[in-house]
Amino acid sequence: SGAKVGQTEPPRVGLSKLFPDGVYPEGELQEYKDDNIWRTTSEEKRAAERAAMEDPSLTYQNIRRAAEVHRQVRAYARKAIRPGMRMMEIADLIEDGTRALVEESGLESGIGFPTGLSLNNCAAHYTPNAGDTIVLQKEDVLKVDIGVHVNGRICDSAFTLTFEPTYNNLLEAVKAATNAGIREAGIDARLGEIGAIIQETMESYEVEVGGKVLPVKSIENLSGHTIVPYMIHGGDRGKSVLLVKNNDQTRMEEGEYYAIETFGSTGRGRVVESGDCSHYAKIYNAPHTPLRLQTAKSLLKTINKHFDTLPFCRRYLDRLGESKYLLALNHLVAQGIVQDYPPLCDQRGAMTAQFEHTILLRPTVKEVISRGNDY
Ligand SMILES: O=S(=O)(c1cccs1)N(Cc1ccc(F)cc1)Cc1ncn[nH]1
Ligand SMILES: [Mn+2]
Ligand SMILES: [Mn+2]
Ligand SMILES: [Mn+2]
């Protein structure tokens, strides 16, 4: 029928039903600045872009489909996440939506990486493991970091949720810093220059908590990063975008995908690995050392089959029927075959916030692919 099929609540209608022609919404466009302004009207660059549009592997439709799934899932998450919910419930709520809308299918489309749900002084890489009984509190500052991929093109975007106004200025600082970083990004932009702009924006804010005025600090050992198919941090040739002033003269290049993410903190402005690990990913050019531990060999087979180099978490192994895998998993980490990504936390009592978007440096224009009307 010609009837317009709409999204349900909770979201369960696959996007190919909402976009039958396979054309997904373009993100926010920002023209390149200064000595790259010529790209906006360059015939040569327009031709390069048309070629990229048509190339099935490069096609922009994959990443735009992932971004539209991201927008629809996060819109529901922002409405449905409430204090009193267990972290496990929140993770399932988001991941059930993602799997349904992206129409999960093996390694062709699915969750891009474990749903980050880091709380308070923890900034990144926390998601509940089985048995986690943590309940969201109304004073909490929750970073929701959602990954969606289509044919390995990963949309990596995150926002921060609060349920009372205490840390509003912290969230404003981080949102402003991320948008400043996105504006500064572009073909030929130097990574060190972007870091300086991010830090300058972030640290022009302060937060008043319990009568004390706290400066907002850029977290100096977290960063934005390049994204390549099936590899969330661009593999061993990946580039990082620091959040503080630095002298990295490396430049951004045409055709690169970046996750531009910033983190602000009322604490030290530095994170350390803390708590049980949940996030893991097979290392790209991992050594093919012969594994003698049978359980490690069979776990690696499961990882290769279901994740390849996409990050995964223990809950994803549980749902595949793996059990008693911890020794094997730790063995794969010790052998340098799998990388562990433990939660990254600032000091106790600190509060951290995050905003993140995925951008694409097209030949003629910068596209903020994951931009929505929410952030
Ligand atoms: O901190 S990172 O490891 C990194 C930053 C620069 C080079 S590698 N990381 C990549 C990542 C690692 C594991 C995941 F499960 C998902 C992503 C950034 C990030 N985490 C969440 N969103 N974005
Ligand atoms: Mn992220
Ligand atoms: Mn990221
Ligand atoms: Mn480690």
Image: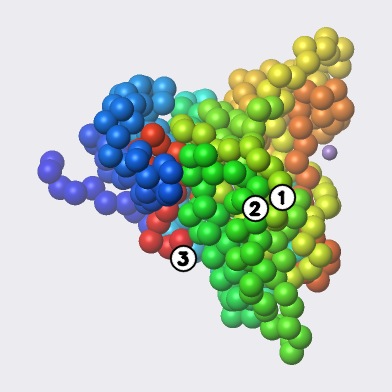
Q: Residue at x 54, y 65 (%)?
A: 176
Q: Which mark is residue 123?
A: none
Query: Against 84, is 316 above or below?
Result: above
Q: Residue at x 61, y 58 (%)?
A: 198
Q: Residue at x 70, y 70 (%)?
A: 216
Q: Quadrant of residue 367?
A: top left
Indicate the position of residue 266 as horizontal and vertical percent values. Answer: 74, 70
Query: Against 318, is 10 above or below?
Result: below
Q: How is the image coloured?
A: rainbow
Which of discs 1 and 3 lies nearer the camera? The answer is 1
Q: Which residue is mark 3?
A: 79
- Residue 298 in view: yes
Q: Which mark is residue 246?
A: 1
Lower position in the chain sequence, tag 1 or tag 3: 3
How would you rate the neighbour count of disc 2 (Cα within 10 Å): few for under 14, some for 14-19, many for 20 or more?
Answer: many
- Left or right: residue 124 versus residue 46 is right
Q: CA distance from mark 3 to mark 2?
A: 33 Å
| Ligand 4 image-quadrant field | top right
Q: Which mark is residue 195?
A: 2
Q: The residue tagged with tag 2: helix, strand or loop? A: helix
- Left or right: residue 117 versus residue 331 is left
Q: CA distance from mark 1 to mark 3?
A: 39 Å
Given the image, on which type of amino acid does mark 2 rest? Gly
- Left or right: residue 238 versus residue 62 is right
Specify the quadrant that holds the N terminus: top left
Q: Are marks 3 and 2 in contact (CB under 8 Å)?
A: no
Query: Against 163, is 23 above or below?
Result: above
As rendered, which of 331 and 248 lies closer to the eye? 248
Q: The residue tagged with tag 3: helix, strand or loop? A: helix
Given the image, on which type of amino acid does mark 3 rest? Lys
Q: Residue at x 82, y 24 (%)?
A: 336
